[in-house]
Image: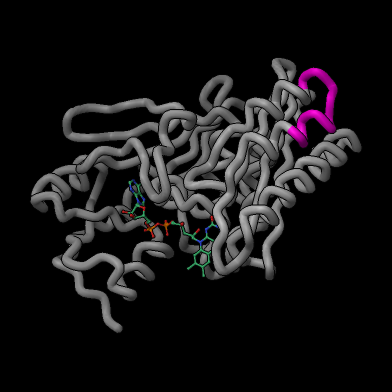
Amino acid sequence: MKAAVGGYARARDLRHALELLAQTNGMGRVLAGGQSLVAALNMRLTTGDVLVDISALSECRGVVEDGDTLRIGALTRHAEIGRDPLIAAHAPLLAEATTHIAHAAIRNRGTIGGAIAHADPAAEFPACALALGAVMHVEGLAGAREIPAADFFRDTFETALEEGEILAAITIPKAEPDEVQVIEEVARRSGDYALAGLCLVRRAAGHRVSLFSTGPKPMLATGAMAALDAGDVEGAIAALKGEIDPPSDTQASGAYRRHLAGVLLRRAVARIEGGTR
Ligand SMILES: Cc1cc2nc3c(=O)[nH]c(=O)nc-3n(C[C@H](O)[C@H](O)[C@H](O)COP(=O)(O)OP(=O)(O)OC[C@H]3O[C@@H](n4cnc5c(N)ncnc54)[C@H](O)[C@@H]3O)c2cc1C
């Protein structure tokens, strides 16, 4: 089947992209790497969209240091995240996450901003953003907004982005000297979306645990975090299983996903106790 789009325009810069979106009478759709959107268009899950191609916006690309944070342009591709030295040094969770995302061809086109704006509950980067305490930098004709990751993901494929807004960048606190960050997931085949996945970050202030593919959106497992802070790994696994209600589908039952979440937390704790950053 061919896509049925209502139009296409290529933006020169961020301002131009916002103006193009404003001219579409609510039918505008940002096109970044196209790795989720084009598939949806081809399957006619959405029709009539006026595509505003932001892929040429150089100001939304690349990773830079900004004081105690890393600023990652929304158009930075998965493959670039995976090999960036600043990411490796200050946000290794993101580098490790890219190894779980799809296949090389998709990682060469897909962007971190696209993955976060798309908000697939099975995607790795939204859960990483939650675990790391990222902030989303959103631009609109009415002005800029900064949205903490904890407030950004609303539901399945639903975020705090308003119509006409563009996610321009993500900032992430640089890892502390002794911080440890790991991601664990189970997928049927390498490159498939995870049946269940978990990010674990250990900082001086405490542990942060986020989950993906266990509910309608990525979530922080606050009960498990408190138990880990108290040094109670078994209590953390029990708390984790109690605070999720995973769905059953053709891939796995909810009960199996709950079991996997506990296994993944145990694996992640074993890794951080073994000192693997
Ligand atoms: C076969 C296959 C397997 C995959 N496996 C995985 C996987 O295991 N894990 C995973 O996480 N992902 C996976 N993906 C998805 C992939 O990572 C996509 O690249 C990503 O989800 C979307 O990024 P994109 O840049 O391609 O966005 P696009 O497809 O261009 O856009 C996706 C959506 O986000 C919106 N959007 C994009 N950028 C912005 C922005 N800056 N501001 C506002 N809105 C924006 C678009 O309007 C659209 O609604 C897979 C994709 C395929 C085709």
Foreground residue, 107 or 153? 153
Please check the rendered image and state whether residue 123 is part of the magenta-colored stretch, yes or no.
no
Residue drawn at (80%, 18%) of the image: 230
Task: Relative to 26, say whether 242 is above or below.
Answer: above
Task: Relative to 64, say whether 121 is above or below.
Answer: below
What is the x, y in percent for residue 151?
42, 29
**Residue 67 placement, left or right of 235:** left
What is the x, y in percent for residue 49?
19, 62
What is the x, y in percent for residue 138?
33, 34
Looking at the rendered image, the quarter that the C terminus falls into is top right
Residue drawn at (58%, 44%) of the image: 245
What is the x, y in percent for residue 236?
76, 30
- How many labels were placed on the picture? 0
Residue drawn at (77%, 36%) of the image: 237
The quarter of the picture where residue 39 lies is bottom left
**Residue 135 placement, left or right of 69:** left
Stretch of the chain drawn in magenta: 229-238
